[in-house]
Image (cartoon, helix red, strand yellow):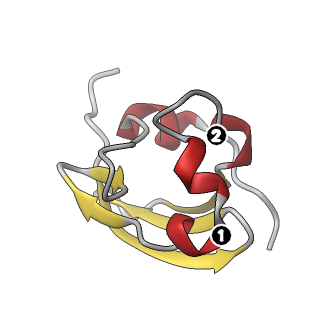
Amino acid sequence: MNFLPCVIHAEYRSEYRIHLTFNDNTEKTIDFWDWLDGSVFEPLKDPHYFQRFFVDGGTVVWPNGADVAPETLYEQEGVVE
């Protein structure tokens, strides 16, 4: 991959879905549910905590340090809204 994707904007949509805009203006809505395994992701199963995400370092991050690599998000198939 010659292009390094970065999330530049993220907006909560519903349940565990976040609409992302990348630095090449690609937009997609990602369902994060399948990634919520393991101790660092456990707090994100609480819908209120899940919504506390923010963009930092080119990806979506939560207050406890949980994140998903921007390349992974970029390659992920988006969901239909």
Above or below, 43 against 68 in this view is below
**15 sits left or right of 37 in the view:** right
Q: Nearer the viewer, residue 80 or 69?
A: 69
Q: What residue would you read off at disc 1? A: 47
Q: Tell me residue 31's x, y (percent).
A: 70, 54
Circle 1: element type = helix
Which residue appears at 37% of the width and 56% of the height? 62
Which residue appears at 27% of the width and 24% of the height? 2
Alpha carbon distance from label 1 to label 2: 12 Å
**Labels in figure, total:** 2
Split into 4 quadrants, where in the image is the N terminus? top left
Query: Local crowd at mark 1 within 10 Å, few (<14), some, or many (≥20)?
Result: few
Split into 4 quadrants, where in the image is the C terminus? bottom right
Which residue appears at 37% of the width and 40% of the height? 70
**30 sits left or right of 11 in the view:** right
Q: Earlier in the sequence, mark 1 or mark 2?
A: 2
Q: Tell me residue 27's x, y (percent).
A: 52, 64
Circle 2: element type = loop
* Marks 1 & 2, CB-CB < 8 Å contact: no
Q: Tell me residue 79's x, y (percent).
A: 77, 58
Q: Tell me residue 67's x, y (percent).
A: 39, 42
Among all residues in the image, which is located at the extreme left?
A: 57
Q: Which mark is residue 36?
A: 2
Residue type beneath disc 2: Leu
Residue type beneath disc 1: Pro
Snapshot quadrant of residue 45: bottom right
Query: Local crowd at mark 2 within 10 Å, few (<14), some, or many (≥20)?
Result: some
**22 sits left or right of 78 in the view:** left
Above or below, 59 against 3 in this view is below
Snapshot quadrant of residue 75: top right
